[in-house]
Amino acid sequence: MYFMVNGTNKKSSNCANFNINASIIDVNWKPDPLGFDGQKMNFTVNLTLDEPTTFYTKIMFSFNDDKGRVIGYTLLPLEENATSILDTFHAIIPRNIPRKYTVSVAVETLGVFSHCINFYRNSRTG
């Protein structure tokens, strides 16, 4: 079943448009809207996992155009055997993000997504 949106940063939705059947994830990020290319972003994640993480479990922060095409992303490892995530992660805003864009955050293990959320925006400050 698709997860319900958790109501974090406004204008968010599940990842069904990417054919991802994933659980809820609680993410807040700043700056919102995106700032300048090369600027550091903070993503605060609060999540109870359905299953413990493995050596292969990663968290991904993806910057996409309004059609969902990936422009840039950051992929970070998660601690092995974790059953929850309560942490702030950092990513750098890539170049050439258009005025209309999405930011996606997902937890995946070997290409299988367990948690995912999309944030839609129509403007940038940078």
Image: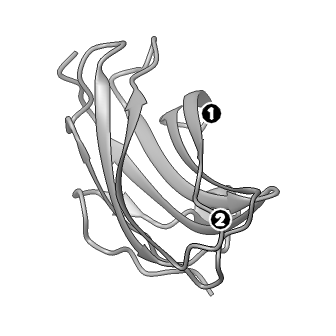
Element under disc 2: loop
Q: Residue at x 75, y 59 (%)?
A: 55
Badge 2: how crowded within 10 Å, few (<14), some, or many (20+)? few
Determine whether, in the image, residue 102 is placed left or right of residue 78: left
Q: Quadrant of residue 31?
A: top left
Task: Provide residue 50's location: percent of width, then percent of height.
Answer: 60, 85
Q: Amino acid at mark 1?
A: Arg
Which of marks 2 and 1 precedes in the sequence? 1
97 over 68 or under it: above or below: above
Q: Residue at x 54, y 79 (%)?
A: 83
Q: Amino acid at mark 2?
A: Glu
Q: How many marks?
A: 2
Query: Which numbered dot is residue 69?
Result: 1
Q: Residue at x 73, y 67 (%)?
A: 54
Question: In 3D space, how far apart are the residues under numbered discs 1 and 2 (Cα atoms)?
Answer: 30 Å
Query: Which numbered dot is residue 80?
Result: 2
